[in-house]
Amino acid sequence: MSSTATAEAHGHDAHGHHEEQNFFLKYFWSTDHKIIGMQYLFTGMFMALVGGFAVYVFRMQLAFPGMSVPGYGRVTATDYNALVTTHGSVMIFWVAMPVLIAALGNYLIPLMIGCDDMVFPRLNRLSYQLFLISVIILFASFMVQGGGFGGAWTAYPPLAAKAEYNLTPLGAPLWLLAVVFEFAAFLLGGINFVTTVMNSRAPGMKMFDVPMVVWMIIIASILFMASVGPLVAGAVMLLFDQTLHTGFFDPNKGGDPILWQHLFWFFGHPEVYVVLLPAMGIVAEVITTFARKKLFAYKTVLYTATGTGVLGFFVWAHHQFIAGIDPRMANIFSVTTLLISIPVAEMIFVYIATLYGGSIRLQTPMLWALAFIAEFLVGGVTGIFLGASGADIYFHDTYFVLAHFHYTFFPIAFIAVFAAMTYWFPKMFGRYMNEAWGKVHFWGTIIPFNFIFIPLFLLGARGDHRRIYDYTHFPDLMKPGMQDLRVLATLSLVTLLAFQGVFLVNFFYSMFFGKKAEANPWKANTLEWLAPSPPPHGNFPGGLPNVYRGPYEFSHPDRQDDYWPQHVEGNQS
Amino acid sequence: MSMTRPIATTRSATGISTGKLAVWWLIASEIVIFGGVLGSYIMHRLGHPEWASQAAHTNTWAGAFNTLVLLTSSLAAVLAHNAAELKDGKKAAKYLWLTILGACIFLVVKGFEWSNEIHHGFTITAHTFWSFYYTAAGIHGLHVIIGAIIMAVIAMDAAKGKDLQRVEAVGLYWHFVDIVWIFLFPLLYIAK
Amino acid sequence: MSDATTAPAAHDAGHGDGGHGHHEDHSKHYIKIWGVLLVLLVASVIGPFIGEATGIQIITLITAFGIAFVKAYLVIKHFMHLTVEKRYIGFLMLTMLAFMLVFVAGVSPDVMKHAGQRWTNDAAEAVVKKGLAEDANGHGGGHDEKKPTEGTPPH
């Protein structure tokens, strides 16, 4: 474990912890935001292995149907459903959200706004504990009779509601309960984050001096808070349908399964912006630092992100175009869906403009940030096809959709996260990661990634339906070349997974044996780089900083240095 | 184990106290939760006029009495806030305990109401109207219970003159719970 | 209600008496509001009776639901002091309500209505018809587990 955070602050004792805490208290009962951030990070990393294992198994099944998968065994149809469900749920709820929002938010926010912790440290600890409980419940769901839930992460009734259909009478409610606990953890966390940023900013830090990643995490937290409510209601209803046999979603009892879909997607769509915005925030931090250039249009990015978030509440039924919704609603949602591509594209344009004319250094974090822009672009553009409800009649539930959302989700959950990890690792652990191995990991991830999902676009366009465990049953989908594409995708996946070993070794080795890093190795401007690497309990041993300028004052013409940290005194427009 | 409050908690760039700001955000997220429950109920209710015969069996007097109880408990909560403003921690605590008493009465009435209904066969699975009835009122009741517990903790501190600013914050939460009931009452009891 | 009764917001400087520990006692005001709330409660219970008796549904709607809004507003303004709070707090609450309206607007064509442009929800319509028929026979179903009717799920 890291040596962050709990070294006693020298002489600066606003915290009354006079005794050295034992290992358990220090690392498992801490209220320090950095420790809690690490807890989320390591939990999220572990869950990524779980989600990665799940996809390895089911893709092996697809490439080599019926054969025993090394490390797992033969994959039955029920297994397949559970694996697909696990992969989706875990990657979104237990990897992307915890790492992007909870880990990075917890770690960075107090540092970047120049204060010593979150405003509610004990609530923070409770949030992690609720989250951990959700992980435990999820694992419990795998181990009960019948196995883990197999109704897909979207959990549509009647499949999700009736055990006689889903065959997981215990797994299904446990899965749902795990999700509910996860939501509770993030609601509490969100309140903590937003209140902290609103109230505890360093003196002199005006709204537009706040680093973009902090803004993005805040907007994401607000979007989450505003969208999860109906799904919480729906989850309770589904839980009752599963366990008490109520009929909320049962048409024979006066309920309506379409209601679940709406409750789910009313949250589900803003959810993608909940994870996208922090990823974009990370990229903003990295590209400004590694292009030595200020963000091209800070306010535009901010307002556009807010606009995207708001507009994101008006598009949800594009996930339901062919579910039997009223066609007039499909028209409306088609229009709004196509419209939302505009603000997102706007942000990408601003990032490109930020890079233009910059003094670009291609260190590992920057490689990841650039890859994010390129790969996310592909994802965004393919979303346009899907947003047109007419085209979606063909594409819905094909691998085209899947490839689209992986070209968006993978950059969000992995590419941006690797950018963040390689960028903030020196701060978190006081040591550098190995740059050469970082580049090996980068190329070993990006190249296979594309070789996984481009074939899936092609397969989807040719008719491959999602959530099918064995295509050999479908003559139309076994035309020449199609199975080869599936095998190519699978082998590329195995390659990609293997290269993550490089990252893990680099990460853990560097944590203990990497070259020691100073406070500001990248010569960046934001306040976290003022704190020592790693920061002690209380963050700023020299006293909490004041702020005198914006976060991206790079290459200022009047300055000799090409950076101008926020906390350094001196006047600035 | 007590923890020294971080400097972060004492700052207030917005001018709103930290605890109060947090409760407003909490209320905002709760609006969406209850909105989801109630919105779903309303849509079903309007689409199923035949539910009226089920709804006729709700106990309007119990509902009205409980509304009275909650409104009075809101009064107690705001009087607690008033006392806290006047720095009278003991009085604030006294009013908070009265609020909690209101919560207990509410729950007891609900208990009798529900057991009576269940006794007559109107269980949560009897009809989807009742599914919504128990779920909506149940989620609300859960918020009453949790609110009462938190309020008790704050009352005990307030009696010692500690953290009086929390009285207002918990009062805000309580008023929100009251407002949800103000709408639940006509929706579940009157809409026949 | 007299306007001098806007109660001070806790902790804020610059409100009312500048937050220097010298707040007025507003208990009488709060009790007055409570009295109004009780009157409204009575009206909201009696009103539907009259509405049922006369058959004029609008009376039920206005007294039961309209008054609910008034009660809520009184609690919001006088007990929660939202009207003297920073303005964006009120906007935040309204925004959340607006999202709920968007939700209902987007979902009701599918869930509330049982037929639309080129589709019908046969199962739901059957359930409604059956239920109304039973009511007409003076015999509401719904004691314990109802036997599910034969109906195909929508779509």
Image (cartoon, coloured by chain):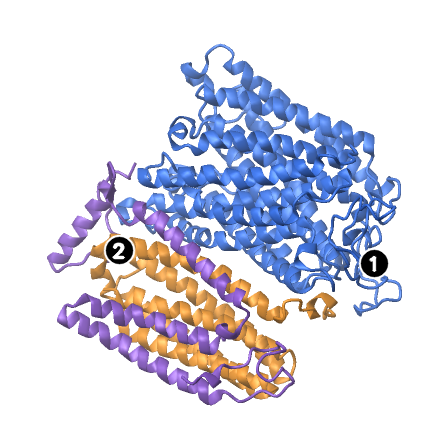
Chain colours: A blue, B orange, C purple
Q: Nearer the viewer, mark 1 or mark 2?
A: 1
Residue that appears at 46% across and 21% down: A461
- Left or right relative to C115: residue C79: right
| Residue B68 occupies quadrant | bottom left
Q: In the rendered image, which quarter contains the C terminus of chain A?
A: bottom right
Asked if badges 1 and 2 are on one and the same chain, I answer: no
Q: Residue C72's image quarter?
A: bottom left
The answer to which of A397 and A151 lies nearer the viewer is A397
Residue A258: x and y, percent?
A: 35, 43
Residue C88 drawn above or below residue A27: below
Q: Residue beneath label 2, please?
A: B46
Q: Give the labeled residue for mark 1.
A: A570
Q: Is residue C109 visible?
A: yes
Identity of the residue furthest to the left in this view = C137
Residue B148 appears anywhere in the view? no
Determine the secondary structure under disc 1.
loop
CA gap between label 1 and label 2 equals 64 Å
Q: Is residue A459 left or right of residue A427?
A: left
Q: Left of A321 or right of it: where is A128?
A: right
Classify A236 as above or below C117: below
Report the amino acid beneath label 1: Gly
Binning the other alpha carbons within 10 Å of mark 2 as few (below 14), some (14 to 19) or many (20 upward) gives some
Residue type at mark 2?
A: Leu
Q: Residue C88: give x, y in percent of width and height.
A: 53, 64
- A493 vs A442, left or right, is left
What is the x, y in percent for residue B75? 45, 81
Q: Position of residue A32 (x, y in %)?
A: 73, 59
Q: Nearer the viewer, residue A467 or A11?
A: A11
Q: Is residue C9 above or below residue A261?
A: below
Identified at 55% across, 14% down, the residue is A484
